[in-house]
Image (tube, grey):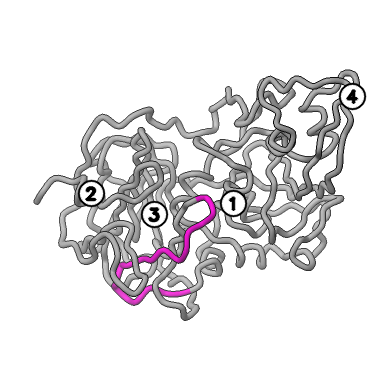
Amino acid sequence: MSGHHNRTLVATISLSAAAMAVSACIPQGSGDYRINGTASSGAADIRPTESAPQLVPENEVINTTPSWSPAIVERNSRQVDGGSYMVQPGDTLSKIVSETGASLADIAAENGLSPPYILRVGQRLTIPTGLYHSVNAGETGIAIARAYGVAWSDIVAVNGLEAPYILGVGQRLKLPAGASGGGEGSYAVNNGDLSPEQRAARFSLNIDDVVTGSEPAFAQTNAGLPSNPIVRTNFAAAVDRPAAFGGRFAWPLSGATISSFGSKGGGKVNDGINIAAELGTAVGASGDGVVVYSGNEIGVFGGLVLVDHGGGWVTAYGHLGELTVARGDKVKAGQKLGSVGETGYVDRPQLHFEIRRDRKPVDPVTMLPAR
């Protein structure tokens, strides 16, 4: 399939596409997850606990509200061969970014420049080598990663992205090794272009990816790129996340804990706890916050809701059979998010529950009332 000017639809990722990204199956009913290495950004790559390939079970997830869908991503990547550039009268760093195709962040870092990026006529700049994607309105980090068949955490690492991970229209992202080529003047790093199915198979997604890469890019008020990270002024399409969390966490439902937090031996790790409950039991928000994800794109968890409580605190609710909230919904503690299901890699009704602070899992039992 030709990579020139094609468009890749990256709306809600289907269970089958997510299944191709998951390499194995969790032992039935175990509810345990492991960290299979650490991504270069420091994010855990959550994968099932065994190595035998298996597709995600076709468990039905009922979503009664619209789910988040990223924009179409146009794979417009451009190969920059590097070299040097002599500053001409009237040049700005944003103009040089546009002419060379490299990112502002990379050019600035390569030449020791810092805001306000004052240049001198005749100054010689080193232009870095790389494959760069130009971000369009509405695109999310996750969508861009899937379009090129790479991990979002690798894009975060290679570009040095930091919170809140919101992209700006026109921002150039350097693509990590292994990205499939896209637009005119680009090339396929991995021996030829990949089909959408092949890119989906190479794409992986975990909770940390959703937390850091699900916000849509938005337009800037000025034509240039004034700094890195880009000054952001239009959050109309982004989730209005709380600034801080002033409350306490509550149990999302009653039930026996069937899998505790932490290491299980043999390389198995559970980043949360698993709570047994009857099929269809209501699952409540553990605290006040805003829904930042509601969907089933992470096959291992099935139906999944993520709530941002502010101050770096995020809670996760997995294996849901029904999702009753949508991305952007403001919720109060105890408000129903969905209901217990058997979705994902489990064979009995249960809830997988996580509490994370600054993207790192915390033992929920230490944050919840004794019972």
Q: Amino acid at mark 4?
A: Gly
Instruction: Please check the rendered image and state whether residue 330 is part of the magenta-colored stretch, yes or no.
Output: no
Question: Residue 247 or 366: which is nearer the viewer?
Answer: 366
**CA distance for labels 2 and 1:** 29 Å
Quarter of the figure with the N terminus: bottom right
**For discs 3 and 4, the disc positioned in front in the rendered view:** 4
Determine whether the residue tagged by mark 3 lies in a helix, strand or loop. Answer: strand
Q: Amino acid at mark 3?
A: Leu
* Residue pictured at 77% horizontal, 40% vertical: 102
Q: Amino acid at mark 1?
A: Ala
Q: In the figure, residue 258 lies in which quadrant?
A: bottom left
For disc 4, the marked residue is 122
Q: Left or right: where does residue 140 sit relative to residue 58?
A: right
Determine whether the residue tagged by mark 1 lies in a helix, strand or loop. Answer: loop
**For discs 3 and 1, the disc positioned in front in the rendered view:** 3
Q: Position of residue 125 (x, y in %)?
A: 82, 33
Q: In the figure, residue 101 lies in which quadrant?
A: top right
Compared with 156, 279 (above or below) is below
Residue at the far bottom: name it.
Answer: 52
For disc 2, the marked residue is 252
Asked whether the residues under the numbered discs 2 and 1 touch, taking CB atoms below 8 Å apart as contact, a structural biologist would say no
For disc 3, the marked residue is 304
Magenta part of the chain: 24-41
**Magenta span: helix, strand or loop, mainly?**
loop
* Residue pictured at 68% horizontal, 33% vertical: 169
Instruction: Please check the rendered image and state whether residue 30 is part of the magenta-colored stretch, yes or no.
Output: yes
For disc 1, the marked residue is 11
Asked whether the residues under the numbered discs 4 and 2 touch, taking CB atoms below 8 Å apart as contact, a structural biologist would say no
Question: Residue 54 or 90: which is nearer the viewer?
Answer: 90
Q: Earlier in the sequence, mark 4 or mark 2?
A: 4
**CA distance for labels 3 and 2:** 14 Å
Determine whether the residue tagged by mark 4 lies in a helix, strand or loop. Answer: loop
